[in-house]
Amino acid sequence: MNGADLLCETLLANDIDVCFANPGTSEMHFVAALDRQPRMRCVLGLFEGVVTGAADGYARMADKPAATLLHLGPGLANGLANLHNARRANTPIVNIVGDHATYHLKYDAPLTSDIESLAWPMSGWVQRIGSADEVGRATGEAIVVARRPPGAVSTLILPADTAWGDVSVPLPAAVELAAASPPDEDLLRQAAVALRSDKNTKILVSGLALREKSLEVLSRIALATGARLMAQQSNGRMQRGAGRVPVDRVPYVIEKAVECFAQTEQVILIGAKAPVGFFAYPGKPSSMLPDSCAVLDMAPGAVDIAQAIVMLADALGVSRDVTPQLSARETPAMPTGALTPEAISVALAHFMPANAVICDESVSSGRDFFRHTYGAEPHDFLQLTGGAIGMGLPLATGAAIACPDRKIIGLQADGSGMYTVQALWTQARERLDTLTIVFANRRYQILHGELVNVGAGAAGHNASRMLDLVDPTLDWVGMANSMGVEAARAETADQFADILKSACARKGPFLIEAVI
Amino acid sequence: MNGADLLCETLLANDIDVCFANPGTSEMHFVAALDRQPRMRCVLGLFEGVVTGAADGYARMADKPAATLLHLGPGLANGLANLHNARRANTPIVNIVGDHATYHLKYDAPLTSDIESLAWPMSGWVQRIGSADEVGRATGEAIVVARRPPGAVSTLILPADTAWGDVSVPLPAAVELAAASPPDEDLLRQAAVALRSDKNTKILVSGLALREKSLEVLSRIALATGARLMAQQSNGRMQRGAGRVPVDRVPYVIEKAVECFAQTEQVILIGAKAPVGFFAYPGKPSSMLPDSCAVLDMAPGAVDIAQAIVMLADALGVSRDVTPQLSARETPAMPTGALTPEAISVALAHFMPANAVICDESVSSGRDFFRHTYGAEPHDFLQLTGGAIGMGLPLATGAAIACPDRKIIGLQADGSGMYTVQALWTQARERLDTLTIVFANRRYQILHGELVNVGAGAAGHNASRMLDLVDPTLDWVGMANSMGVEAARAETADQFADILKSACARKGPFLIEAVI
């Protein structure tokens, strides 16, 4: 048995049986070891941003990590943007990066680079394996760190000679995972005191607080105390729709966010961060909170969020019999006429099947979706958490591998979609039940707005050349077809509704180019 | 005038008038400033790997840097793989990365990351601008460093408030560029002594030594001394073809490289590095040179390579009247029958026009090209220098912007081509005279070979899933068309020759899917 075999055995012993991969020569012993392990599902991405984004989507839905397989520093570099998003979502990933053999590094061969320097900004943990015998221990540690609440990206650097070297240590058993920490009684007490006051209070949540059952407890707390329950602007996963607690998110647009918190005297954070501007703007604040607003992080770090929420309800004496606020099923009237972002959202609210998984990278075009789908069929809503575009198609790919029996719907801006468009091929190859809706507005719409915001007025020649996706227009139907994904183009609301209805009724990858 | 205006003025004052870009909100003042500068050509890439790879191709052919415009850490991350290749080619690039406003960083907004840590592995110089008034000085320094021989990637981090802040310092003049260092007389003397000996000697060159005139001097030296002139395995740019000095390269395959140097007693390096294995393999050496081989780096660091070569010839008393060895024009017979990599190379040798620029990312499939084209029309040959695939299409894009009157021919492996396939759109938009030949073997062919090399034998299920690009097959013609590039598929040598002939006679972007 060599180090690569030990790596596979350790992953499988710890219930990691999916590996998103794009290997190279230095990973060839790892490939050979995977080839000896039919239990491992190896999923090829034709670019590493697909690999890491899929690993993110997989773990958000599977609640356990996948492994990745990346080729040295440049392969890691290609996957970093989506690891950035994963890090911001606290997604567990065991991110495996091959490197040259230890003794070969000093020769500075062409593919040599400082992998640690590249990895640290997007990882919670980085370790370089020193020998084949170390593979089991290091992989176990990577898994423990990845799965320690709230979850992290563990980057494990695997020099080629540690993969091909013989192993003399025994086979690994499953590692002992770190449990979440018990809630801090003092913080709970402070939160209860705050919620009993008559101050204007918001409970701002993210992470595991956004699962159905925790939201129901939170809703009862909000009803009992008069606090307003809100979600962070961007969240890794949120359970919503009919029969679930309706939760607003902090607005993206800075003026609206500031207005949202203008009267707020105290904020209790549960799995969330205090709201700040996505970007800085001249003369506008960085924090969305009034200076005088008190902030209490009730369940920081590795705290068991679900337990903390239940204990808070108990501390407040909120009865478990109180009915939480739940959204009723609403089927909106079908849109007709011009195809607008709103028409797309309404049609989705109408047709999307129960238990769909929505992967949202619609940027400016999809902002209507949220408000139109409180009463849609229950669904999971996965967002772009780190702002690094190019996450949507890979995220949907990974979510579909985790949830083969659910319809995965990608809300995809056209500009962002082009970043990792190669994911469509993986969707075709793996026969995934992914429906991608491309909001084809033929421009980086959000940036046109920002250009006006900076006082530059309408775009001239050079700005237009950088912000518009015309000349030529992208043919998304042809693009999808070229990678084996069936597709159709919709140019009116009625066309879109017809195509969406049949797309929701079929299985397998499909793409709708929605010309808006 | 704000910092962004000052940045544009400084670039233009230093003859940098092309900016490859993919901006975001934090760069919007820079976009607005570029919009006020019609002299600047702004070229949008739909992914940052296109941006940085195009900047590399541009500078290799223009012999001066372009600027880039990247969006924070994730935007930089997406461009790192091609910056890695640029660094290995010593390509000058002024790599501009936006960041949050200085005061906004402490809020850890979603897109925040450690840009310096990401940038250093692929940069020769990294600097963060502290204020608007610093923009001119810092940009000037970035330009000086980028252009200091042999060339480097300068990464300039531009916080948003340094772009939008008012400038109180005067407008910049052109900076004084650092000249190349004069050759070291002692090293020249040592080289001359070595070349006068009767030892088995190789002169191994790269960089500016591979330009036509320097190669002619080198050829005279080789003829006079009996040394063998060779080029590094991978080179940023090489001038070759009919009427030029034929130079072999160090073989990629390790056994062949070792054999090539087996009898070599001394190596004189001029702009090249001592040859090492691209990867390590169990039981095979890292260095390609015998242990006893002496190595002399005759023109290290910033030394003026062209001058050093002339001075060496003078020191050896090599007459300027000696005719160097030059390749005669040879037009091979047209291939017929099955379409093979060799048939493609022969057809190219037959049809490619004079002064074509070849951008080679054909990996295993294009190895025949080199030996068949010593007698082809004179051309520049640009290679994948750092082994980070996804360079070919962007490199061709940038080379075409630098050389609007020359035919740019990309030799493109299909696996690598998918990495940065978005470059096709930029080729269409900019009406570039790029001809891409996709070697469509439907697999990572080189890795199949490596799998056999590691003793794993033929690929089983999991290895095939990671190494083969079938199920579904990529439709390169449809892919190109979807981004506005005309394309055709060739399945026989005769078909390929016909399509190539007409493609060479037309202007504008075109792609041939060569099914091999």
Image (spheres, coloured by chain):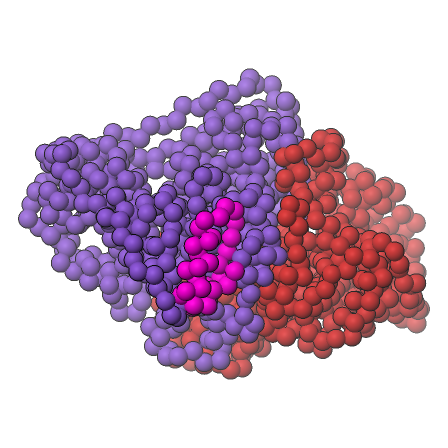
Chain colours: A red, B purple
The residue located at (43%, 78%) in the rendering is B459
The residue located at (63%, 25%) in the rendering is B2
- In the picture, which quadrant includes the N terminus of chain A? bottom left
- Tell me where residue A60 appears, x and y as whole percent: 67, 66
Write down the quadrant of residue B486 in the picture.
Answer: bottom right
- Tell me where residue B330 appears, x and y as whole percent: 27, 52
- Residue B77 lies in the magenta stretch: no
- Tell me where residue B428 appears, x and y as whole percent: 57, 48
- Residue B496 lies in the magenta stretch: yes
Q: Is residue A56 visible?
A: no
Left or right of B185? Residue B138 is right
- Tell me where residue A462 appears, x and y as whole percent: 63, 35
Q: Is residue B165 visible?
A: yes
- In the image, residue B477 above or below residue B304: below
> Looking at the image, which residue sits at the far top?
B170
Question: Which sits in the foreground, A341 or A314?
Answer: A341
Question: Which sits in the foreground, B163 or A92?
Answer: B163
Question: Which sits in the foreground, A115 or B31?
Answer: B31
- The region drawn magenta spans B488-516
Left or right of A323? Residue A367 is left
